[in-house]
Image (tube, rainbow, N blue to C red):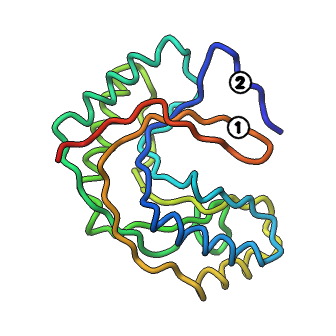
Amino acid sequence: MITPQPSNTVRVFVAVAISPELEKACARLIRKLQEVPAPVKWVRPEGIHITLKFLGNVPQEQLPQIKAAVRRAVEGQRAFSITSEGLGGFPDLKRPRVIWIGLQENTLAPLKQLQQRVETELVRLGFEPENRPFQPHLTLGRVRAPRNIEWVVHTLEKHPPPPISFPVKEVVLMRSELRREGARYTPLERFALAD
C-alpha cells in the first residue's frame, strides 16, 4: 500500500546517474530475470542510480538549503569513472530482499569521498547520519516473497552483466514519487563536478 505524502513535502534523495550503456545492460538482465515466475518487483531501468543520501519527505521550503548543501559538497570535486561488477543481495543472495549489481572496489575511492562530503553537509542541516557503511550498488529488484528466488539467483549467476565503466560528471537531487507502477524519479537540480 502506498502511503499518501503530505502536500507540503517532497520525497528526495541525492544520487549519481548511470550511463546509457549500463542502463541498457541492466534492462537486458531484468528482461531475462522477468522470465522466472518469482514475486520480485523489478525496477524500471531508466530509474537505476547510485544513492548517495536518502532524505525522505522534506518540507518544500527546505529545498533551497538542501540544494546549497549539495552544491557545497560537490564544489571542487573532480569528475571520475567507476565500473559495475558482480551481483549481490541484501542481506545476501541466499535469501535476498533486494537484488543488485555491484561496483568494482578499486574504482570507488572518489565515489566514497563524494558520498562522505554529501553526508557531512546534509548532517549539518539536521539530517540523521547514516548508521550503516556506504555500500554503493545498482538495485535491480525487490523481493516480495521467497518463492522461486533460487531460480532468480541461478539465472543471475548464469547471465552476469559484463563490467561496464562509466563517467560520473554530476550529482543529482532527485524527487521520488511513489506510484502503483513503481517509483517515478524527477531531477530537481543537477550539480556538475569539476573537469
Looking at the picture, tell me which residue is in the foreground, 63 or 24: 24
Q: Which mark is residue 5?
A: 2
User: Residue lying farthest bottom?
Assistant: 158
Place residue 130 in its image quadrant.
top left
Pointer 2 and pointer 1: residues touching (CB < 8 Å)?
yes
Mark found first going from the N terminus, 2 or 1: 2
Looking at the picture, tell me which residue is in the foreground, 154 or 77: 77
**Mark 1, residue position:** 178
Residue at 29%, 29% (x, y): give it.
Answer: 71
Q: Which mark is residue 30?
A: none
The amino acid sitting under disc 1 is Leu
**Residue 70 in picture, x, y percent from top left:** 33, 30
Place residue 33 in its image quadrant.
bottom right
Looking at the picture, tell me which residue is in the foreground, 164 or 94: 164
The amino acid sitting under disc 2 is Gln
- The answer to whether 123 is drawn above or below residue 39 in the figure is above
- The answer to whether 174 is drawn above or below residue 81 in the figure is above
